[in-house]
Image: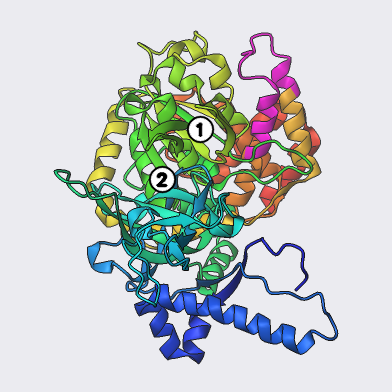
Amino acid sequence: MQNESLNEHYNLLINFVKLFENLPNFGNKILTNPLDTLQICDDGIKQVQSKIISENLENNPQLSIKNNVHTRIFGLPACPELHRTIFPKNCDLGKFLKICGTVVRTTAVKMLEYQRQLLCTKCKHEFTVVATYEKKFIFDIPRFCPSPEGCNGMNFKKIQSKLQHSDCKDYQELKIQEQINDLNIGTIPSSMWVTLEDELVDSCKPGDHVGITGIVLKRSNNVAIGKRPDIELVLRANYVQIFNEQKSTTNVTDATINEINTFWEKNDPFTARHIILKSICPSIFGMTMVKLAVALILAGGSKFSESHTRTEPHLLMVGDPGTGKSQLLRWIGHVIPRCVLTTGIGSTAAGLTVTAVMEDGHWQLEAGALVLADGGVCCIDEFNSMREHDRASIHEAMEQQTISVAKASMVCKLSTKCSILAAANFKGDFDANQPLENCVAIASPLLSRFDLVLVLRDTVNEEWDLVVSDHILNTPKLVKDTTNYWPIDTLKAYFMIIKNLNPVLNQDANDILRIYYQHQRQKPSRSAARTTVRLLDSLIRLSQAHARFMYREEVTVLDALMAVYLTEINTDSNLLRAECSNPKQQYLEIVRNILGKLELYDILKREEELLSNN
């Protein structure tokens, strides 16, 4: 080891499973007495360095010992005794555990003085005092001199007048919260403070989903007369692992992948897609196109080549009460592992983005709903109930997928790479002759950031009401039909698998989207808010999402046409509410209608021939 970087901190990663297989007794000591055992490991690393240097000193005299090397234990088995999603209690004090949660707050990185070199003024004995972790690193100065000669001196002074680098370390605290998806319904998530030291500081930010291995300890303030002691459980971190990608509780095994491959090979694409769409919120009858729009938002688009355009699409559902908007949002929370559900009536700009909190005389950033949903989906119900100022605060989060913070002298950017699914009611009665922004009372700049805006109306139809009531009464029987419905665990696994696909547009799909965008721009009655360049970006995202949903890595004519079709029928309530009984025939009508209007007759002819052969 060379002389440079001697003051830097390094870690030695040890897999606990492999350690336990080779040294079971030592593994048990780490679990039962982690503080002393980990210190023994750190001392052992220094001894090994000394041995290596002594053996190689002649060949390389520049070698020297690095004192700041720490043992980091990872890979604890996923058993209830060691791996917790529900935060530990008092009975877990002193245990070595792995705790999973979401970072909701981080403090600034500080320099912590953890030891002092003192000198007895009477006998000149030098000794070191280490700060007490349980008392928030307060020094307990001994009353009498600890000299072995039995000196009873009571006066001490610091050996060095200036603060030494070797007596300090980097220190940071973060607050983690239990994952909502791991809790029972109606349970309020708990939070816990975690302390990071040395090279672990700045390893995560608000919104990150983390797994932290560490020691459960207690911590309290100074005990004062007449004041109740404030004691809390904290986790002294030993290793930090970040899971920013979506993690499902459903294990995606090779058998599941083979089952999905067989499903698509056995069924034609239209039948297979229809079975999956019927499995999305099966308690809602019909609404095939609305369910398809929701599926595309959950699937998401793929990365553009050499482009920084966002890949996560957004959906706004506007409609009458009782059209199933809230039910769809709540169903999404059961399928997507990283989903945050909130309502507009109780959401503010700070609650959605990030807020600055004063605690112990220091400002700290606390993550809001969009930051916590980074990498997943944020569902906002009653979107129209939010104040205009609060809605305007998510402009940057929706398009640039970041939140710029400039609060209390803290200037930073946080990531919000999530899809937004919002539901809102009409402002008064819906008038198809009025611009959409007037009917929903949402400003044009915000409305243009939604890839799809679907209008759902509750029209009176006796035949429709009879079919819907019959479906609701028979839903428990229908869901048990595994031939025509997918169970929710299979849907969870499917949406996890298709996230790895990266579809690319072929030439025909490229031509359809380009001609349709030009056609929309040239319309005399076009909506200026909806026909910007964002429309083209939305069409690309939706067509790629449809290709993902169809389990393909190429965007074909089918994907491009379905993206255009969803954009066109956004205000046609009858088509949005309808149950698709013949998906192939419906697609043939879409092909003739859209390609005929765009005058793409060559693609129309090839697509008709392809459908007739199949």
Residue 499 picture quarter:
bottom right
For residue 561, the mark is: none
Residue 469 picture quarter:
top left
Circle 1 is placed at which residue position? 315
Residue 484 shows in this picture = no
In the image, what residue occupies the spot 47% across and 10% down? 438
| Residue neighbourhood size for the residue with mark 1, other residues' Cα within 10 Å, grouped as few (<14), some (14–19), many (≥20) | many
Q: Amino acid at mark 1?
A: Leu
Query: Number of callouts in the render?
Result: 2
Helix, strand, or loop for circle 2?
helix
Color style of the picture: rainbow
Along the viewing direction, whichever of 422 and 409 lies nearer the viewer: 409
Helix, strand, or loop for circle 1?
strand
Q: Earlier in the sequence, mark 2 or mark 1?
A: 1
Looking at the rendering, in which quadrant would you find the N terminus?
bottom right
State the extent of the magenta-drawn residues as a range.
Answer: 518-541
Circle 2 is placed at which residue position? 332
Q: x, y percentage for residue 273?
A: 53, 51
Specify whether residue 523 is painted magenta.
Answer: yes
Q: Amino acid at mark 2?
A: Ile
Q: x, y percentage for residue 607?
A: 72, 44
Left or right: 264 as drawn, with respect to 491: right
In the image, what residue occupies the spot 52% across and 43% down? 374
Q: x, y percentage for residue 95?
A: 34, 71
In the image, what residue occupies the spot 47% across and 75% down? 38
Specify whether residue 434 is painted magenta.
Answer: no
